[in-house]
């Protein structure tokens, strides 16, 4: 089973993607970029430019960057099932962002500029300090 939004493959018995909140499908849609699920794709030269607490904001930003021609991905750092826990959400937010935004090294400046224009002050909080170096 696959998530039709992020392309992640899940074992039998899981019906919904915990990150995207999408119902899983047996096959990815034709329009899905199969390279994003190809294990041979390496993000070795990609730079983590931000850590965000909201999957929705991270995904919105990545989609906006892509429309500007900037390759970008969201990597969940919140664990296999996202930020689900018995601990209140307010307690979790102090630990740092659960979602990292990665872009190829040659797009860091462009991505930073676009993200700041889109998110403003929220970007300043999520942005990693060393991306401009």
Image (cartoon, grey):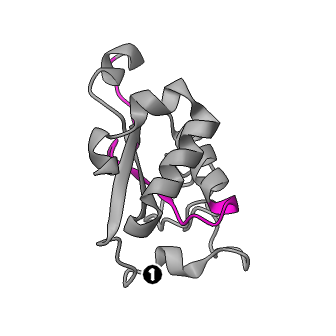
Image quarter for residue 4?
bottom right
Residue 9 placement (x, y as % from top left): 47, 68
Looking at the image, can residue 53 be seen? no
* Residue located 48% across and 75% down the image: 37
Does dot 1 land on a helix, a strand or a loop? loop
In this picture, residue 38 sits left or right of residue 22: left
Q: Is residue 13 above or below residue 7?
A: above
Residue tagged 1: 38
Q: Extreme bottom residue here? A: 40
Instruction: Give 111 or 72, whichever is nearer the viewer.
Output: 111
Does 65 lie within the magenta span? no
Q: Residue at x 44, y 30 (%)?
A: 124
The answer to whether residue 112 is seen in the rendering is yes
Along the line of sight, the residue nearer the viewer: 49 or 41: 49
Residue 19 in the image, given as x and y percentages of width and height: 50, 47
Residue 77 on the magenta span: yes
Highlighted range, magenta:
66-87
Above or below, comparing residue 100 to residue 85 in the picture: below
Location of residue 79 by image quarter: top left
């Amino acid at each position: 089973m696959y998530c039709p939004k992020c392309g992640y493959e899940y074992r039998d018995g899981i019906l919904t993607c915990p990150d995207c909140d999408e119902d899983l499908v047996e096959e990815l849609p034709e329009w899905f970029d199969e390279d994003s699920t190809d294990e041979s794709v390496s993000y070795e030269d990609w730079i983590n430019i931000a850590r965000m607490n909201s999957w929705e904001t991270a995904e919105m930003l990545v989609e906006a960057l892509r429309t500007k021609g900037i390759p970008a991905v969201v990597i969940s750092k919140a664990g296999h099932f996202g930020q689900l826990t018995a601990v209140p959400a307010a307690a979790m937010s102090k630990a740092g962002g659960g979602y990292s935004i990665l872009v190829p090294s040659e797009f860091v400046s462009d991505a930073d500029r676009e993200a700041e224009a889109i998110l403003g002050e929220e970007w300043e909080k999520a942005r990693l300090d060393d991306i401009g170096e």
